[in-house]
Image (spheres, rainbow, N blue to C red):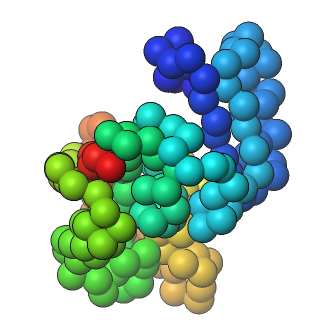
Amino acid sequence: MRLASKIKKGVGIDLEPSMITLANKNKKNRDIKNITFKIMDSDKLNFPANSFDVVTAKHSPINFKKIYHILKPGGILITQQVHETDKYNLKQAFKRGQNFNVKAGKLLKQYKQQAKQAGFNNIKTDISNMPYYFASKNKLQEYLISSPVVPDYGRKNDKIIFENFSNKNKTNKGIRSNTSRFFMEMKK
């Protein structure tokens, strides 16, 4: 929806119906008329060939072949994905987590290879890694409960690990971790 004022027409997809409901509510509240939302699996893009000038994907699975198919010639795919080093000190503390044992850079390398195999060219990449601060223990707790960063949060020793982590990483800005993303831009 942030792009609505810069484009003629857009379509947003998500597999989760509640996300589409929320998006439609936000669209109505902002009086946006040039964006539609559909429940759709990114592995089963139900659009004709050569339909889009630009496709964006953020923190979602990507089927490069399907996206290549629906992009117009010269079309652009831009994606932002979670890097393996995201919230790394949390994953180290809990000794588990999303991509915990995956070598840093492996996902970007895999995505780049898949993009090339699908036919994309002019592939540009970048990585961002910045400090991230949770405002309080409650905010960190909410994050751990609602995100996949530390799977099965709430195990037997997690409360002790949580307290130790919070105390060790407490700063005047909040409880310190990091946010790490990789970005890709490519052309059909």
| Observer able to see residue 21 | yes
Picture coordinates of residue 109 (x, y %)?
Answer: 21, 72
Residue at 60% over, 23% down: 9
Number of marks drawn: 0
> Where does the image place residue 103, in percent across and percent down from the top left?
21, 81
* Quadrant in the picture for residue 45: bottom right
Left/right placement of residue 54 relative to residue 46 reads left
Q: Can residue 87 be seen in this view?
A: no
In-front residue for pair 121/61:
121
Q: In this view, does 97 lie above or below 125?
A: below
Choose top left, top right, bottom left or bottom right for residue 26: top right
Residue ID at (80%, 49%): 18
- Which residue is found at the position 51% from the left and 18% from the top? 7
Q: Which residue is drawn at 31% across and 63% down?
A: 119
Q: Position of residue 27 (x, y in %)?
A: 72, 22
Toward the viewer: 17 or 142? 17
| Quadrant in which the N terminus appears | top right
Residue 149 percent across, percent down from the top left: 47, 68
Relative to 28, 55 lies left or right: left
The relative height of residue 150 versus residue 73 in the rendered view (above or below) is below
